[in-house]
Amino acid sequence: MAAKTIISRPVYGTLSPQPGKHHLFVADAEGALAIIDMAGKAPDGFFDGAEIVFIAGPEGKHIAALEALKPAQLHLPPSFASLLPRLKQTLTNAHMGLRLYLCGTEGLIGQAMQVALEAGIDHTSIETEHRGSLARRMQCVHCKGITENVTTQPALCSHCGLLLLVRDHYSRRLAAFQGVCINAEDRSEIPPMEEIFR
Amino acid sequence: MSTGTTKLDVVVSDVVPVNELVTRFHFRRRDGELLPTFSGGAHVVVEMRDGNRTRLNPYSLMGSPLDTREYTISVRRDDIGRGGSLFMHRSVHAGLEMVISYPVNLFSLDLRAKKHLMLAGGIGITPFMAQTAQLAGSGGNFELHYTCRTASLGTYADLLQQRYGRRVRLYHDDRNERVDLDRLLSSQPLGTHLYVCGPAGMINWVRDRAAVLGWPSETVHFEHFAAPQPGAPFDVTLAVSGKTIRVGEQQSLLEAIEAAGVDPPYLCRGGVCGQCETNVISYDGKFIHNDHWLSEEDHRSGCKIMPCVSRFEGKSLVLER
């Protein structure tokens, strides 16, 4: 789990079943395990009003375990981009009483939260649990390009090619960490690149 | 000077009877200047010089925040209360010079909301008068459900319906009209915030149902000014100021501390804001906690008290004041 360093750095919790009529889970990768662990604490009939959206990845792991929870709906989109229109549609038509649970990688939690914030859900009322990779979604503060799945420090901006220091400074609006040029004074200075956000 | 309670010198510019229980008071600044800006839901603490006794009661500002030439409050007469509302009804007349606090808002709108759902009971309508005016001025989306005992006690109901039409829904107890609360709460679009002001029973009912139906607590706002409850007199030692005082039957602990010349901070005087929170140094007896501020754990610990509404029964109490 990520440690809190500066105030904007998101800190995640452990999913717990909330009161309410409708429960929407958005998960990827090992996030499925967070749902399965939570199911043990959920009251009877909890999943009768639940929809699970799960990006399983190429290996298709954990799908059978999620099916076994017998949610009202189980949707398996291939990528976040492909689930986005449906997620927006669901939230637009939803009523108060819908509870949102986001679990899995930081990139997924952040981007799904971004959509939820636009729909009027306060970030403090969203249940989150981080599982799996610590890879970051990073914005280059110079060219504003977003680079997904950053695991190194420093990291290369995939748009403008600058070498960036990946900061803990996080933008909830962009769902991205900020990357700042690490050798702006002297471009010939190339610090060693280490893999640290595994 | 108490925190947040900077004073305003005002003159009562008008006193208007509204119905058999409610009277409206208008205040203007004595120097003729505009009053400070406020936002819907704000209250002021009105100082009442009642003989040798000073009463301090909080009242919601009910005028439009877009017009600060005057402040208006509406006071419901409470014949069996501690006397503040009776003083307002009997002794306050146009032309009287009074002192009120700067506005404080403990019941503000969350302007990130997509929609504002308001539930008022009785005199609990007053903060919504200002909030609806504020939202109407900025094109905000709101809906007001207002419960009153009878049509004649539906304070400002006519005015609200005239201003906002179908956005206002009335329920009269004497006609057995009830809010279908579960249905109302379950049919609100995502991003709605809920505001409730009225009797404690109504607030508890609405908060409970909202929680059960899955409304996050961040989206549920409520305001309830608990008047200090009377009780048996008790003695208190104030350790910092080295005074021992007696709290009278009809007096709150906060009022007794003030009467002894100590000036503790306060904002709401109703057990909700937390400003007057005081550490307990030692005690032998039992606390009667009436506040909504401290946690249950704080209440059990015996380490803290909210002197604006809470009391004590027992042999000795020493406070850090």
Image (cartoon, rainbow, N blue to C red):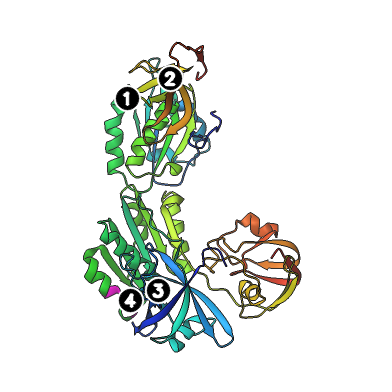
Q: Which picture quadrant has residue B119?
A: bottom left
Q: Can residue A169 be seen in this view?
A: yes
**SS label for mark 2:** loop
Q: Mark 2 points at which residue?
A: A184
Calculate the distance from the C-alpha at mark 4 to the C-alpha at mark 1. Answer: 54 Å
Which sits earlier in the primary sequence, circle 4 or circle 3? 3
**Dot 3: chain letter:** B
**SS label for mark 3:** helix
Q: Name the residue under label 3.
A: B123
Magenta region, residue range: B153-158
| Residue closer to the observer: A142 or B310 | A142
Residue shown at the point (51%, 34%) measured from the top left: A11
Q: Is residue A71 visible?
A: no
Residue shown at the point (65%, 59%) measured from the top left: B299
| Residue closer to the observer: A147 or B32 | B32
Calculate the distance from the C-alpha at mark 3 to the C-alpha at mark 2. Answer: 63 Å
> Is residue B171 rendered to the left or right of residue B304?
left
**The label number, if any, that marks residue B154 in the structure image:** 4
Dot 4 crowding, Cα within 10 Å, few <14, some 14–19, many 20+: many
- On the image, the x and y values in percent for residue B57 come to 50, 75
Q: Name the residue under label 1.
A: A77
